[in-house]
Amino acid sequence: MDYEVDLYLRQRWHDDRFEMSGISGPLDLNDPKLVQRIWKPEVFFANAKHAEFQYVTVPNVLVRISPSGDILYMLRLKLTFSCMMDLYRYPLDSQVCTIELASFSKTTDELQLHWFKAAPVILYENMKLPQFEIQNVNTSLCNETFHIGEYSCLKAEFNLQRSIGYHLVQSYLPTILIVVISWVSFWLDVEAIPARITLGVTTLLTISSKGAGIQGNLPPVSYVKAIDVWMGACTMFVFAALLEFTFVNYLWRKRPGTAKSPSSVLTAVPESKVAVLIPEKACNGDLAPCSLISSGTDVNPSPTDADSIKNNHKIQAKRIDQTCRIAFPMAFLAFSIAYWPYYLF
């Protein structure tokens, strides 16, 4: 990521040649032609991609020479720096951006850079960033060695914490509401097919477009970000609610099997009584054939048993809806409890 900085660069050094120059008081020079005639440290910003010198309304440069030989060189610059960001925890991340000031042509044998002891980096008192909060600023040395020699370098590190308020309002709260709205389908009647399909498809398309909008504002990276995990989980919950309705509707509309059940075979008997034939010798010793004796047992099943077998799949469909009314919110709550502490701390 690139960021722009408008800064005042102040450099101090001592030049023995001005001790005997006869200057009675501090001498200020702001003419660029005169400034060029004075020796100055040859420094540059190592991680700057673009720089501009301020000319409005006059060249923003000042050289102050004191009678003791101390020189203050101050100029105003507008620079664009590159910051290598790790977006693994985005938008719950914190970043460290640096400004590096190094010697261009003088090695450490000729030029050594040091931070000013008292407040080396001073920030504007009421400065606010749109997406970040500056936690603190650390200064250090970053001398670098090349094949020519070792060069002096100064580094300022800005510890930035991303403000989550914008993303809560624009990303997290809308997606939570979309997921909760998809659960309304569990309270609708199973036979309300148009309403449940419309609700499921609409929430799925809405959260998909929301995720595409969020990704459009981010640079493409090769790893999964925190916002990707959140959007993926929310999309999965909405899609699972749509699949649940598909399965429930299938159970509700499922017809009983075509094979004859025992009840259908028994009801085919024309009589409600079962006839039993008793052998001839069993009729009191007479040789006359015995008559048929009815057992008096009714084999027809009760109507309530047949209805319960027929409506068993509908009862299961309603039970699935009732279970999902509790299971889905509990699963989403468990995911949130695991998500927020992991990426915040």
Image: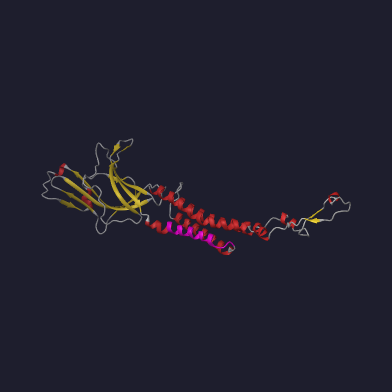
Instruction: Residue 57: say if magenta.
Output: no
- Mainly helix, strand or loop, the magenta region? helix
Q: At x 72% / y 54%, what residue is drawn?
A: 262
Part of the protein shown in magenta = 172-190
**Nearer to me, 334 or 84:** 334
Is 136 on the left-hand or right-hand side of 217? left
Is 16 on the left-hand or right-hand side of 131? left
Is 96 on the left-hand or right-hand side of 67? right
In this picture the colour scheme is: secondary structure
Is 302 on the left-hand or right-hand side of 133? right
**Nearer to me, 23 or 174:** 174
- Residue 239 makes an appearance in the image: no
Q: Give percent across and percent down for residue 263.
A: 72, 56
Q: At x 43% / y 50%, what residue is drawn?
A: 337
- Residue 330 makes an appearance in the image: yes
Q: At x 68% / y 60%, what residue is drawn?
A: 303
- Which residue reaches farthest right? 287
Q: Give percent across and percent down for residue 228.
A: 46, 51
Instruction: Residue 188: say if magenta.
Output: yes
Q: Give percent across and percent down for residue 330.
A: 48, 53
